[in-house]
């Protein structure tokens, strides 16, 4: 399960908060922000940072935790929840005659 919230939408920049539940039964999850930019009108690039992961007991546990998070995160990103946030459609000019 994931919660996706727009934070900023401009014609050339979008910021979206994504909260992903890793263990729904224990109410454990992480939130991070995705930043998208239209680089000089040449195309969109996406940046994110996973720096808020809490420490794990071992190196292997840290890798396993990130793997689990990325699996859940990937499913959230592939959902249709982002389509309505596309600024190309939001800021498209409608021509009428």
Image (tube, helix red, strand yellow):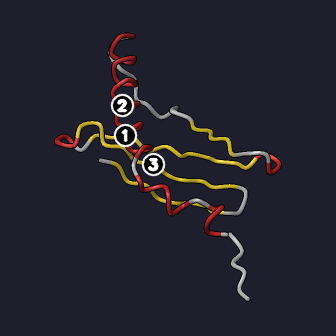
Picture residue at 61% right of the left edge, 65% below the top: 89
- Could you say which is closer to the camera, residue 33 or residue 73? 73
Residue 46, x across and y down, in percent: 62, 41
Picture residue at 36% right of the left edge, 43% below the top: 20
Mark 3 / mark 2, whichever is N-terminal:
3
| Residue 2: numbered disc | none
Q: CA distance from mark 1 to mark 3?
A: 12 Å
Q: Quadrant of the C terminus?
A: bottom right
Q: Regarding mark 2 in the picture, which secondary structure is present there?
A: helix
- Residue at label 1? 75
Labels 3, 2: front one: 2
In the figure, 74 relative to 55: above or below? Answer: below
In the figure, 63 relative to 79: above or below? Answer: above
Q: Regarding mark 1 in the picture, which secondary structure is present there?
A: helix
- Could you say which is closer to the camera, residue 77 or residue 1? 77
Residue 39, x across and y down, in percent: 78, 45
Q: Regarding mark 3 in the picture, which secondary structure is present there?
A: strand
Q: CA distance from mark 2 to mark 1?
A: 7 Å
Crowd rating for badge 2 (residues with CA inside 10 Å; few <14, some 14–19, many 20+): few
Question: Is the Cβ of the residue at disc 2 closer than 8 Å to that at disc 1?
Answer: yes
Which residue is farthest left? Answer: 25
Labels 1, 3: front one: 1
- Residue at label 2? 71
> How many numbered discs sit on the rendered protein?
3
Residue 87, x across and y down, in percent: 63, 62
Mark 1 / mark 3, whichever is N-terminal:
3
- Residue 27 left/right relative to 60: left
Residue 10, x across and y down, in percent: 69, 63
- Residue at label 3? 18
Picture residue at 68% right of the left edge, 69% below the top: 91
Picture residue at 80% right of the left edge, 51% below the top: 41
| Quadrant assignment, res 76 | top left
């Amino acid at each position: 399960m994931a919660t996706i919230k727009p934070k900023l939408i401009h014609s050339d920049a979008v910021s979206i908060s994504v909260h992903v539940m890793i263990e729904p039964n224990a109410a454990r999850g992480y939130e991070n922000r995705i930043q998208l930019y239209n680089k000089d009108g040449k195309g969109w690039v996406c940046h994110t940072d996973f720096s808020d992961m809490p420490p794990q007991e071992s190196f292997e546990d840290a890798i396993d935790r990130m793997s689990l998070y990325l699996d859940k995160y990937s499913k959230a990103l592939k959902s249709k929840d982002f389509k309505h946030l596309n600024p190309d459609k939001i800021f498209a000019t409608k021509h009428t005659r």
